Amino acid sequence: MALTLDHEATILQTLSGGIGIPTLYWFGKAYNQKTMITDALGPSLEEIFDRSNRYFDMPLVLEVASQLIFRLEWMHSHHIAHGQLSPFSFAMGASIWQTPQVILADFTNINSSQFSTKKDLQAVADILVYLAIGPPS
C-alpha cells in the first residue's frame, strides 16, 4: 500500500533529527501539486553493490550493519516500523558531509497502523546476508 505524500511527510517530520534520516525542508503546494523538499540522496545500497561487482568485504558489511541497526533503532523508538525494507530502501548520502552515511531513503510503503519491529529486524538480517554472500544462485 503506497502512502500519500502527506503521510510520507508526516513520517519524515516525526523522524526528523535522526542520523541517517533525510531532512524534510518543506512540504506544501506549489503550482497546484503537492511538493516535498528533502535532502538529496546518493545511490541505493543495491546500486552500490552492483557497482562493486556484487562484493562487499566484511569490514564494509559490518559498517553497513551498524548503520542499518542504528536507523531501525531510531525509527522504532518513534513507534514506526517500515515493514518492507530492502537494499533499495537505503541510500548513501549525496552531500560531502553525508558521504559515509547510509540513509533510510524509502518511506513510501510504511504502514504505521501495524507496528512490528520483528519484520524490520528480519529484513535487515536478510539484507546483510545478501551483501555478505551475494544473491542466491
Image (spheres, rainbow, N blue to C red):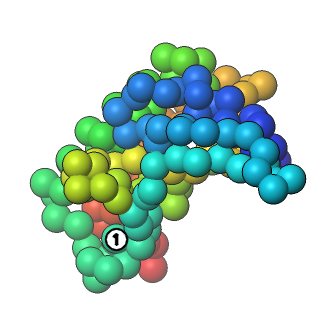
Residue in the foreground of this view, choosing between 85 and 23? 23
Give left or right: position of 5 versus 69. Answer: right
Residue lying furthest left in this view? Answer: 59
Above or below, 79 relative to 57 = above
Residue lying furthest right in this view? Answer: 32
Q: Position of residue 80 (x, y in %)?
A: 61, 25
Residue in the foreground of this view, choosing between 9 and 109? 9
Above or below, 80 relative to 52 = above
Give left or right: position of 53 versus 118. Answer: left
- Mark 1: secondary structure: helix
Residue in the foreground of this view, choosing between 95 and 89? 95
User: Is residue 83 among what the camera can see?
Assistant: no
Q: Residue 69 appears in which quarter of the rendering?
A: top left
Above or below, 3 relative to 113 = below
Q: Residue at x 23, y 56 (%)?
A: 96
Neighbour tally class for label 1: few under 14, some 14-19, many 20 plus, Cα within 10 Å: some
Q: Residue at x 60, y 39 (%)?
A: 26
**Amino acid type of the residue that numbered disc 1 sits on in the rendered structure:** Ile
Give left or right: position of 59 versus 40. Answer: left
- Number of callouts: 1
User: Is residue 34 among what the camera can see?
Assistant: yes
Residue in the foreground of this view, choosing between 77 and 8? 8
Q: Position of residue 99 (x, y in %)?
A: 25, 55
Provide the residue designation for mark 1: 48
Q: Position of residue 38 (x, y in %)?
A: 53, 47
Split into 4 quadrants, where in the image is the C terminus?
A: bottom left
Q: Residue at x 39, y 63 (%)?
A: 42
Q: Residue at x 34, y 71 (%)?
A: 49
Q: Position of residue 125 (x, y in %)?
A: 41, 45
